[in-house]
Image: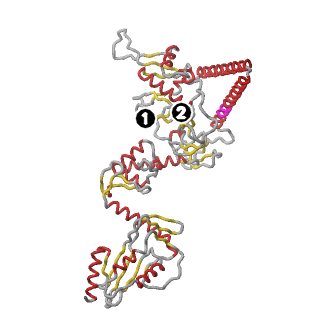
Amino acid sequence: MANLEKQTDEILVLQSIFDGRFRLLNGNDQYEISIDFDLNEPFYIRCNDKAAIVRYLPPFTLIIHYHDEYPSDYPPSFVLSCFYFSKPSLQNLCQKLDNYAFVKGEVCVFDWIELIRQEITNELVLDKGFGEQINDPRALNGYLADNIDHIYQYLINYNAEKEEQQFRNQLQTCLICTEMISGTDCIRLYRCGHFYCQSCLNNYVQLTFNNGQFGDQVHCPQSQCQKALLPNEIKAILQDERLYERYERITLQRALQAMEDVIWCPRCQSAVLTGGKDDTLCVCHQCHFTFCRKCKELFHFQTTCPKDYIMEQMLLKKQREMERLQREAEEKRERIRKIQEGDLAVAATLEERALAQRATMDKRKITAAKQRVAKQPYREIVVNLAEEDQLLETILNAERVEALNTQLCPYCHVRIEKNGGCTHMRCANCYRDFTWKSGEGTRDPQVASLLYQFPFASSVGSIKEDLIQQSVQHSQRVDENQPQEGERKEETKFVINNKSLIGAAIVQRVKPCPNTSCKKLNVKTGEDNWIVCTGCMKQFCFSCLQSINGAQHFQRKCDRYTPLPN
């Protein structure tokens, strides 16, 4: 068979094998083949101290030029081109093709292609250190040492594009609903690679928003995956401009609230950048209002901030309480020691003295509490008899939680219980770390609390009986549209006022919803004044009973976190 016929047959075979990756250049004597590498998994790309795993590499280009003496006497001419091979690597590969055992009369281009594919096995190293170079003009486009970082990033981007293309060309199974859908209808998350259908992700993201989670708190739905969704992914998932604008606004607002050096102007609600924690002077660049960082009032130069004074008094009171507890603990240890030593008479005397001191202190506490109750402005609440048990049980549960070994998160003020382990804690609400304050454990209830008045109450029955015994005023519902016939309807409501210790314990923790069509009684738990009504789901401030929409109210007017009066 003549050389021309063998060349033509070889071209036809290569065209059938490589299809779109085969391209004729000039007539039938010159053509170009794009060679893809079959990469082993995992395949690494290394560049200096960086490494990445890829599944795809750009094609390697082989240009073949036939001459009259191929394949009878000599192999064809060739040119190698690959931008992620170094110049010396391409030149060495040219030498390998030259040294390949050519059999006269046999075509060799496909064997050359297989030889080129063997150049890459488990990894590709982009190296700056070039050895001795051979000046071979057949090696084109080899990289230089100056641009290996750009090539490394390009290869990573190319691999990502090919993986995305491969993903979209195949059928995929949604990891939530397990439906088989086209890859083009799936959304694959960039940070973790998990993918879901549009409908499932949309429902998941909106449910996450309804639970109050925004920004980095919106994680991949996979149970063990903690990767946060990117903003552009959330935008593609929602496909709702108004909802996405709400997401951006709340995310930005929470990010600013989490910054210790940003505070909100109480006059125009603009974000104000402050100095350190000791710097209380704040100047709003929007409305030029100069105010105190702590109390949000007009800046008071060279005077103690009222908020600082209140904090000092609270710390002083806490310190005195700790000292009292320490004295009692020392006296108890002394009594135990006396008992162990056999001096029962002395021990009994010490025990009686301790009980007398405790009774005296309890009496003083009760007297002081009654005096505070008598001085406070009159306030009452109207309770439906059908809701009485549930209301009292809710108050008792709130007091029990506060009496446990719990502390407030210093960042979001959510109450956290410690049941073991070291002092390093992580808040389950804001995911921030803090140190547990040692020396604090289960606390005695305040005098103005139901737990103090009924320490052994397992139900609300005894509390209800005491309310009746103290002659809490009951009210009746009278239908004005019905004529008065002398018969009174069965009592459906009763009034609790704050002029007794039990009444004060209830009234100080309960306020009605300001929504006139609701008026549901809501119980404050902990120190948070941001209340969501359990009846109509409206939001309001426990301090001023104003309806609110977001956290800006607490930056402008009221403190969000305030303790109940003792």
Residue at 30 percent across and 53 percent down: it is: 180
Question: In this rendering, would 158 be left or right of 269?
Answer: left
From this viewpoint, is residue 560 visible?
A: no
Question: Can residue 550 be seen in this snapshot?
Answer: yes
| Badge 1 or badge 2: first in the primary sequence | 2
- Give the camera-side residue of 16 and 146: 16
Q: Is residue 139 above or below residue 194?
A: below
Could you say where residue 169 lies in the image, as x and y percent from the top left?
31, 61
Which labelled disc corresponds to residue 538?
Answer: 1
Q: Quadrant of the N terminus?
A: bottom left
Question: As shown in the figure, which amino acid type bears the numbered disc 1?
Answer: Lys
Checking the image for residue 526, the label placed there is 2
Residue type (three-letter) at the residue carrying disc 2:
Gly
Tell me where residue 68 sits by quadrant. bottom left
Q: Which residues are magenta?
A: 313-319
Per the image, is 33 magenta?
no
Q: On the rendered structure, is 367 left or right of 250?
A: right
Q: Main secondary structure of the magenta part?
A: helix
Which residue is found at the position 56% from the left and 48% from the top? 259
Q: Please check the rendered image and state whether residue 317 is part of the magenta-colored stretch, yes or no.
A: yes
